[in-house]
């Protein structure tokens, strides 16, 4: 494979911040999408069908809404996170609230300060019954690392060193050349000769991250089309002319996700002949986890690909088209790299961006699908692949009711380590209105990686 893959002249980039409702209505009326101010694509682009324009309309409208509520949503998230931590780290919540309103300083311990995701599932310990050599070990460790990636550096470091008895290799906050700020986080750990790279996923109150998940923007490489938003998060070039194998010097010296992580892996692998690594992530982090080795393959990183022992993603959105999938699967077969894409029940995120008709987004790799009883099965595609089906609405609501009931009885069936927090029960209650939203919680993916039968895995 050539060390550099140029992007063709075919692309479509959506800029919801440039759109108005009038522009959106015109998009539905007129077929020449290149004339819309919020769509960047080649002038010679062919006219698109109404279905395609309708899906762009929905995507942009949802993104416009998310942008409009981004700031208040962030403030709500910060308040919820603060209150949850005040309650968990102080014995008397009413006293804490009184002190808070009186302006008294309330203690905050970074080692125990949890994100909203962490409060939904506060488990720290690895499953004591799944040890190295178990066919489930890499997946179970990957999911716990993916869950831990949502937390602050001090919490992750303490968990890795004190709970997991592994080596903490660093927490990284990466630069996004599009948004001119740090937006991508990841951390690395080492379990003997195994290095784990875990990307942080979509945070619940981050409107911009959710808008990336539903964005329909794409670039076309010679090996297929790829979602542009996820490539932005990896820090690849703002100008879609090419993605260089080596990053040009930047006077700002900002760390960029793909290049920084790749260099760290190069050094560690060259220093240890036995070293190998796996890549993982939940939600948006899962998209970055599969695209990271994809770019390694595009750049011909033979040494790294030979040491890659697996990609494990959980609740991952679609990242490209069929051609991209065929390229990645071919490269993974060549280097014998397993790629498992875990999907739990009605989780909405693996079902976006949409597939079908004129849309090119399509999953690839091995799908390990788990129903709400945590029964696993290997599939090419998860059921109800685009989520928005009226025929599936009632079954999804009934399933959400069962998940709420299960949250009260699971510790008596599976053990106290599966006890769900009151906060997660509240999320499941909200999930009755939006079935599939609560199913995206890391809690269910941790349970699936532990309770699912080992026979679902085709290989280690």
Image (spheres, grey):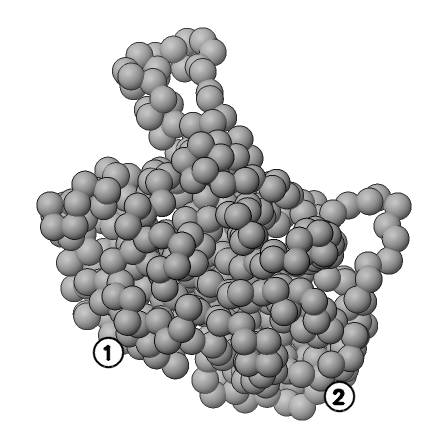
Q: Is residue 348 above or below residue 323?
A: above
**Residue 298 % position (x, y):** 71, 74
How many residues crowd mark 1 within 10 Å: few (<14), some (14–19), many (20+)?
few
**Residue 332 % position (x, y):** 57, 77
Task: Give the side of residue 133 with respect to residue 400, left or right.
Answer: right
- Observer-side mark, 2 or 1, equals 1
Residue 286 shows in the view: yes
Contact, mark 2 vs mark 1 (Cβ under 8 Å): no
Residue 13 shows in the view: no
How many residues crowd mark 2 within 10 Å: few (<14), some (14–19), many (20+)?
few
Q: Camera-side residue: 210 or 45?
A: 210
Quickly name the residue at label 2: 44
Secondary structure type for disc 1: helix
**Residue 363 % position (x, y):** 47, 77
Q: Camera-side residue: 306 or 362?
A: 306
Q: Residue at x 48, y 84 (%)?
A: 51
Q: Residue at x 39, y 81 (%)?
A: 380
**Residue 400 % position (x, y):** 21, 59
Q: Residue at x 19, y 70 (%)?
A: 395
Quadrant into which the N terminus falls: bottom right
Quickly name the residue at label 1: 391
Residue 290's disc is none
């Amino acid at each position: 494979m050539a060390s550099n893959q140029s992007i063709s002249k075919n692309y479509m980039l959506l800029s919801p911040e440039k759109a108005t409702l009038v522009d959106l209505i015109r998009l539905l009326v007129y077929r020449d999408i290149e004339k819309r101010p919020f769509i960047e694509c080649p002038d010679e682009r062919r006219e698109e069908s109404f279905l395609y324009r309708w899906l762009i309309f929905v995507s942009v409208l949802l993104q416009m809404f998310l942008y409009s509520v981004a700031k208040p949503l962030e403030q709500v998230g910060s308040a919820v996170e603060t209150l949850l931590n005040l309650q968990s780290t102080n014995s008397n919540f009413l006293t804490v609230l009184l002190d808070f309103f009186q302006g008294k300083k309330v203690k905050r311990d970074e080692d125990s300060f949890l994100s909203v995701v962490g409060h939904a599932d506060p488990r720290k310990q690895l499953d004591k019954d799944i040890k190295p050599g178990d066919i489930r070990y890499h997946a179970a460790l990957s999911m716990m690392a993916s869950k831990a990636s949502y937390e602050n550096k001090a919490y992750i470091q303490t968990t890795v060193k004190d709970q997991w008895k592994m080596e903490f290799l660093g927490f990284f906050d990466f630069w996004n050349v599009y948004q001119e700020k740090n937006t991508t986080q990841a951390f690395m750990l080492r379990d003997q000769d195994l290095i784990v790279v875990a990307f942080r996923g979509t945070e619940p109150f981050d409107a911009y991250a959710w808008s990336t998940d539903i964005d329909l923007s794409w670039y076309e490489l010679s090996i297929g089309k790829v979602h542009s938003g996820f490539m932005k998060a990896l820090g690849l070039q703002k100008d879609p002319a090419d993605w260089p194998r080596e990053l040009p010097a930047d006077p700002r010296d900002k760390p960029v996700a793909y290049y920084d992580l790749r260099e760290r892996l190069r050094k560690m692998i060259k220093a240890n002949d036995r070293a190998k690594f796996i890549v993982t992530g939940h939600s948006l982090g899962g998209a970055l986890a599969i695209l990271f080795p994809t770019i390694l393959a595009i750049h011909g990183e033979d040494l790294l690909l030979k040491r890659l022992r697996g990609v494990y993603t959980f609740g991952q959105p679609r990242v490209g088209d069929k051609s991209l999938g065929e390229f990645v699967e071919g490269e993974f077969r060549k280097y014998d790299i397993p790629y498992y894409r875990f999907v739990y029940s009605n989780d909405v995120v693996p079902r976006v961006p949409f597939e079908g008709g004129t849309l090119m987004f399509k999953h690839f790799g091995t799908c390990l699908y788990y129903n709400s009883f945590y029964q696993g099965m290997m599939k090419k595609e998860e059921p109800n692949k685009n989520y928005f089906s009226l025929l599936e609405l009632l079954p999804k609501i009934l399933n959400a009711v069962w998940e709420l009931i299960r949250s009260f009885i699971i510790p008596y069936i599976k053990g106290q380590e599966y006890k769900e927090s009151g906060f997660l029960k509240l999320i499941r209650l909200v999930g009755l209105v939006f079935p599939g939203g609560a199913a995206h919680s890391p809690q269910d993916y941790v349970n699936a990686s532990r309770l699912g039968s080992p026979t679902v895995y085709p290989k280690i």
